[in-house]
Image (cartoon, grey):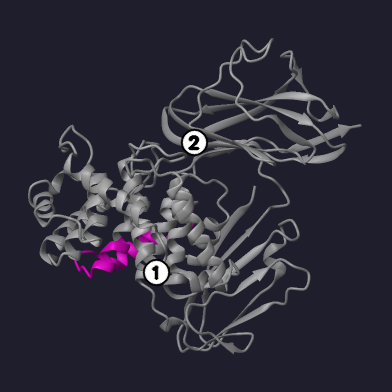
């Protein structure tokens, strides 16, 4: 699997830093990519986060929205990184709009993998993206957008009470913020939630979103009170994400901190210690979920200041705006000489992506995953040497280390000599001899040309199994990549199998 590494470098005034192919020394040739940034773009590692979102391999509605949303504001940075020119990026945003609208139900809501309704927070998130896209000049069909906004309005009007033992409120706060941007929120509702239900909002993000809605309507006093509450809630959640708890809003403490920073800055609120939030959100050393990435990028956008790049040069040419030189791992790639011609020290953020030459050994944090093969009759099989035409049953077993609640993605890349033979999940009794095989019902599965993917919502400490069929098709000797499982919204909880070799004989 590809890895990302981030490093912070202090560059003194008058000193030159040279970025060369040496940073890719431990990666497979041709897979490396590196970027540098300064200012808020560097503090928050905006290039690295954009790159990570661009390369994110899955595609549920939340993930599709998260990949496109930052491009509405950071297209110049994305273009400088080689992710496409402005026309390419516009097409990608248009395609994302089309994709999420294909998952819109008749009620106006959105499903995570298909057109269904019921996920109120996801409805608000997608409608937020569509609202922002329309404001940036993108075309969103009027009927679809009206249905999305009406769905939020109806769900707010008929939402059950929350507070105390009745959990909730995250989705209502988000819906009210989106409705306020569209001029569709009732001021009486905003004041009621701020005055009567204020302390019942369970997350810092919900408090900040209600504050943003009030600020949009000009009630800065109540808005500041909600932002102050968001800051107080964040202060009680300073620890790392050490527990895997189910959150209906796809969030973590880090995501909430980034979103509160973005919204408070955009709202012009002085109720928070912005410097402390910047330090917390920009701290390196952690793999981030799509939600953490997108809200960190929105915070960077809200805090953009091009001044720190004044006096910097790349290979002698002055730098205009945030510094984002990109180096591809190619044999003819020339080094980049970045000189700090300013009068003060500056921090550079270097992010490298690539496939390491030495794969991680089998192991994991929070989970273990095993991959086994069986014949059609149910006998154990060795995939390292099989003949063309052989059909095998792939069985993936995921074992949690403890009680956990997670939206998991199981990702099993195929060796190049194999293809998926029957695009369906196998269950007990599907094949003679496999009556012992008990598999779970996945939320969603994809049978791609080069890999098998399956999304599983799992709230247990018990192991579960998935199974599908492959066929050996091409003679040769092939690398067999590791199978992976990861918590999509707490990606530090993940596991992988060993890599291996597969030989397909004529």
Q: Is residue 140 left or right of residue 334?
A: left
Disc 1 crowd rating (10 Å Cα; few below 14, some 14-19, many 20+) is: few
**Disc 1 element:** loop
Residue closest to the far right = 506
Disc 2 crowd rating (10 Å Cα; few below 14, some 14-19, many 20+) is: many
- Identify the residue at image location x=48%, y=55%: 96
Return the residue at label 1: 137
**Disc 2 element:** strand
Q: Is residue 48 visible?
A: no
The magenta segment is 261-286
The x, y position of residue 365, in whole percent, is 52, 38
Q: Quadrant of residue 41?
A: bottom left
463 or 114, nearer to the observer? 114
> Does the CB distance between marks 1 and 2 fall below 8 Å?
no
Residue 357 part of the magenta-drawn span: no
- Please say if 77 is above or below 293: below
- Please say if 48 is above or below 432: below
Q: Is residue 375 visible?
A: yes
The x, y position of residue 223, in whole percent, is 16, 61
Return the residue at label 2: 408
Of callouts 1 and 2, the N-terminal one: 1
Q: Is residue 342 left or right of residue 354?
A: left
Alpha carbons under labels 1 and 2: distance apart: 35 Å
Residue closest to the far front = 143
342 or 46, nearer to the observer? 46
Closer to the eye: label 1 or 2? 1
> Which SS type dominates the magenta stretch?
helix
Quick one: quadrant of the C terminus?
Answer: top right
- Identify the residue at image location x=68%, y=53%: 355
The x, y position of residue 173, in whole percent, is 22, 50
The mark total stands at 2
């Amino acid at each position: 699997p590809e890895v990302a590494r981030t490093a912070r470098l202090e560059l003194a005034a008058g000193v030159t830093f040279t970025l060369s192919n040496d940073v890719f020394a431990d990666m497979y040739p041709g897979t490396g990519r590196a970027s540098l940034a300064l200012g808020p773009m560097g503090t928050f590692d905006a290039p690295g986060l954009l790159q990570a979102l661009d390369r994110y391999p899955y595609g549920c509605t939340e993930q599709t929205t998260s990949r496109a949303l930052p491009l509405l504001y950071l297209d110049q940075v994305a273009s400088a990184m080689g992710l496409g020119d402005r026309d390419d990026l516009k097409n990608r945003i248009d395609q994302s709009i089309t994709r999420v609208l294909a998952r819109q139900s008749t009620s106006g809501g959105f499903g995570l993998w298909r057109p269904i309704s019921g996920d109120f927070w996801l409805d608000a998130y997608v409608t937020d993206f569509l609202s922002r896209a329309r404001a940036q000049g993108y075309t969103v069909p009027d009927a679809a957008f009206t249905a999305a906004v009406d769905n939020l309005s109806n769900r707010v009007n008929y939402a059950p009470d929350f507070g105390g033992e009745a959990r909730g409120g995250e989705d209502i706060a988000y819906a009210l913020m989106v409705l306020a941007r569209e001029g569709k929120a009732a001021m009486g509702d905003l004041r009621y939630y701020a005055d009567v239900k204020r302390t019942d909002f369970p997350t810092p993000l919900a408090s900040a979103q209600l504050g943003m809605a009030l600020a949009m309507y000009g009630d800065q006093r109540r808005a500041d009170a909600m932002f102050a509450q968001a800051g107080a809630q964040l202060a009680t959640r300073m620890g790392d994400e050490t527990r895997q708890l189910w959150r209906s809003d796809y969030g973590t403490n880090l995501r909430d901190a980034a979103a509160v920073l973005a919204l408070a800055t955009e709202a012009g609120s002085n109720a928070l210690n912005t410097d402390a939030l910047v330090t917390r959100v920009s701290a390196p050393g952690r793999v981030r979920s799509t939600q953490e990435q997108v809200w960190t990028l929105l915070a960077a956008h809200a805090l953009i200041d091009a001044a720190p790049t004044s006096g910097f040069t790349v290979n002698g040419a002055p730098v205009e705006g945030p510094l984002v030189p990109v180096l591809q791992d190619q044999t003819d790639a020339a080094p980049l000489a970045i000189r700090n011609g300013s009068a003060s020290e500056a921090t550079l953020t270097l992010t490298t992506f690539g496939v390491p030459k030495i794969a991680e050994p089998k192991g994991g944090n929070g989970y273990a995953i095993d991959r086994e093969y069986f014949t059609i009759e149910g006998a154990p099989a060795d995939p390292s040497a099989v003949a063309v035409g052989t059909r095998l049953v792939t069985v993936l077993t995921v074992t949690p280390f403890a009680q956990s609640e997670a939206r998991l993605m199981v990702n099993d890349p195929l060796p190049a000599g194999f293809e998926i033979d029957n695009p369906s999940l196998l269950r007990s009794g599907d094949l003679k001899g496999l009556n012992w095989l008990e598999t779970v019902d996945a939320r969603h599965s994809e049978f791609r040309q080069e890999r098998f993917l399956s999304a599983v919502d799992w709230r247990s400490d018990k192991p579960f199994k998935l199974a599908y069929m492959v066929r050996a098709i091409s003679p040769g000797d092939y690398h067999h990549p590791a199978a992976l499982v990861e918590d999509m919204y707490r990606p530090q909880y993940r596991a992988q199998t060993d890599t291996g070799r597969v030989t397909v004989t004529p």
